[in-house]
């Protein structure tokens, strides 16, 4: 049997899961981030509203908050 590799990129997956679990955040800019305390303070995923503020994956939390002070992390 030939080997098959499937790569699936689930756009904004972590942010989508958070919004499913917390529907009150649906109309707010949301980002899932690493821990600032552990020096992993970067954006891992963001919703479409956060994208409108130019929030990017791998951006530092400090920079993301500067661009969008109301960002929910």
Image: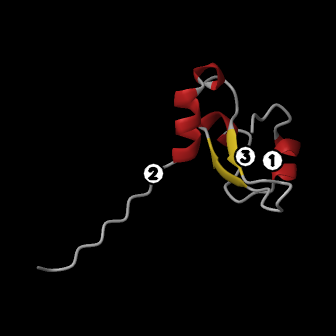
Secondary element at image label 1: helix
Q: Nearer the viewer, residue 55 or 4?
A: 4
Which residue is denoted by mark 1 in the rendering? 64
Secondary element at image label 2: loop
Q: Residues within 10 Å of mark 3 (few under 14, many from 20)?
A: few
2 and 3 marks in contact (CB < 8 Å): no
Q: Residues within 10 Å of mark 1 (few under 14, many from 20)?
A: many
Which residue is denoted by mark 3 in the rendering? 54
Viewer can see residue 19: yes
Secondary element at image label 3: loop
Judged by depth in the image, the label closer to the viewer, 3 or 1, is: 1
Q: Quadrant of residue 23?
A: top right
- Residue extending farthest to the top is 24
Which residue is denoted by mark 2 in the rendering? 10
3 and 1 marks in contact (CB < 8 Å): no
Q: Residues within 10 Å of mark 2 (few under 14, many from 20)?
A: few
């Amino acid at each position: 049997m030939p080997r098959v590799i499937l790569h699936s990129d689930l756009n904004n997956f972590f942010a989508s899961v958070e919004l499913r679990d917390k529907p009150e955040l649906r109309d707010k800019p949301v980002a899932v981030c690493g821990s600032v305390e552990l020096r992993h303070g970067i954006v891992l995923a963001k919703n479409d509203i956060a994208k409108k503020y130019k929030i990017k994956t791998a951006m530092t939390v400090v920079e993301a908050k500067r661009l969008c002070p109301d960002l929910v992390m």
